[in-house]
Amino acid sequence: MRAIVVLLAIPLSLVACRRAEPPAGEAAAPGGAAAAAPAQAGSPAFVTSATFLRREPTDAPRVKGPAGKEVSSWVATLQRGERVSLLETRGDWGRVRASDDQEGWVKASALLPGEGVTEATVRTAADVFDRPDLLAANARRKVEPGTLLLVVKQKPPFAEVNVSGTSNAWVLADRLAAAERDVAVAKLIEKARWLERSGKHDEAKQILELARGHFPDEPLLEVLATDLGEAAPAAGGASTDAPDASGSGH
């Protein structure tokens, strides 16, 4: 009888061991917890730097089209801060759906998982910290006014923000401006600055005028105007056609 009990216990112990093993292809995390699942189809993401949306996951400028003829790989140019849906990943590439429902491939390094991420900017230059500690202030770095920031994490009184591309920084959270208007203006400033860096000065000025039309009297737009080489208005709005010293005005 005892031998029968022992024999029955062996298969049961094997079943218990199998249940403790992670599924095939899934590594066990420290402490026995399962590793984080990969991004699911349709998960949100932010574009962190201006990048091309491509037909195929390759840097090649031309690829084979539906009829077998070579076509341009370019589908669209996505700007920093655009929201996309991540559909799948393949090596260094991610297939995404843009806001107009166009689909294509971008470099995975240009994507930031969007869960829990919010948008903000700063109205004046903000100090940067290498770590969330006042002693970790970095005197060589500043976040410029009007920069579109993607807020990744809050650790009061600090916030970790994506500044551009893969570059993150810590700033004091009370410096962030996250109202809808502030973010909208920052997005237009981001686009204009990208156009200026790309040598498209006239188009950058057009974005500035567009922003002024929608957001009149927005101080951050004067920062952009200075970036684009536009002279700042005289203090107090004084006219350059002031009367002479005699006060006659003639």
Image (cartoon, helix red, strand yellow):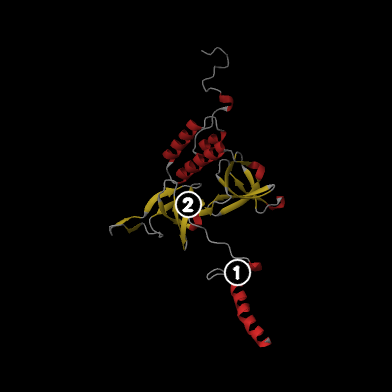
Q: Is residue 213 left or right of residue 149?
A: left
Residue hosting label 1: 28
Residue 147 lies, with reference to residue 16, above or below; the image says above
Q: Horizontal and vertical percent for residue 228?
A: 49, 38
Residue pushed farthest right?
135
The residue indicated by pointer 2 is 85
- Viewer-proximal residue, 225 or 87? 87
- Left or right, 171 with respect to 77, comes to right
| Residue depicted at x 49% and y 40% | 188
Q: CA distance from mark 2 to mark 1?
A: 28 Å
Considering the numbered disc 1 on the image, is that residue within a helix, a strand or a loop? loop
Q: Are marks 2 and 1 in contact (CB under 8 Å)?
A: no
Count of numbered circles on the image: 2
Q: Are there few (<14), some (14-19), or many (20+) residues within 10 Å of tag 2? A: many
* Mark 1 closeness class: few <14, some 14–19, many ≥20 residues within 10 Å: some
Which residue is rendered at x = 63% and y = 82% of the image? Answer: 8
Seen in the picture, residue 10 relative to 209 is either above or below; the reply is below
Amino acid under label 2? Ser
Q: Amino acid at mark 1?
A: Ala
Q: Which residue is farthest front?
A: 1
Specify the quadrant that holds the N terminus. bottom right
Q: Which residue appears at 50% of the width and 43% of the height?
A: 190
Rendered image quadrant of residue 234: top right
